[in-house]
Image (spheres, grey):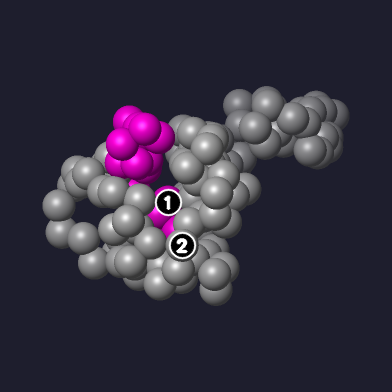
Amino acid sequence: MKTLTVTVSENGQQIAQFEIASESNVADIWKAIEPLRTDKAVPVPIKVGRKYSRLAQAFSQLTDTDTQLSFAQIEDWLGERLPASAREHRAWWANDPSHAQARAWMAPGWRSQDVDLASETLRFRKHQE
């Protein structure tokens, strides 16, 4: 009997570990789980909450692959003012799917970059899978 230990991590944190026991050799077990490997995995759809759904819709309609936006333009898309933290902390604009606002641009395939808090602008680039 062969045993393969599988560890599941998210953002560097171990979230699960399990063992697979099999009469198969390790190569056969590895082949069976190959679709789960990071470099081969099927992307999981990112869900956007109601608060930022208008923002996600606006990003979905962009036809360019690279765009510079002002905070004011984003507020127009949102239909409300950005929270103060968006103007104070670059991390608010991070491409972190655990943040509701980031899911709004990540779900339609965009990634933020070049955040300039002083000029209240940033660039978004269409992410190539």
Establish if 9 lies above or below 76. Answer: above
- Looking at the image, which residue is at 32% across and 56% down? 72
Type of the residue with mark 1: Met
Of 26 and 97, nearer the camera is 97
> Which quadrant of the figure has residue 28?
top right
Establish if 40 lies above or below 45. Answer: above
Q: CA distance from mark 2 to mark 1?
A: 20 Å
Q: What percent of the width, then of the height, locates residue 36?
A: 57, 42
Of 32 and 75, nearer the camera is 75
- Looking at the image, which residue is at 79% across and 38% down? 15
Establish if 20 lies above or below 76. Answer: above
Which quadrant does the C terminus fall into? top left
Q: Is residue 129 visible?
A: no
Q: Of callouts 2 and 1, which one flags the residue occurring earlier in the amino acid sequence? A: 2
Residue span colored magenta:
104-121
Q: What percent of the width, then of the height, locates residue 95?
A: 48, 40
What residue is pinned by disc 2?
81
Tag shown at residue 106:
1
Q: Please, what secondary structure does the residue beneath circle 1 have? A: helix
Q: Please, what secondary structure does the residue beneath circle 2 have? A: loop
Type of the residue with mark 2: Arg
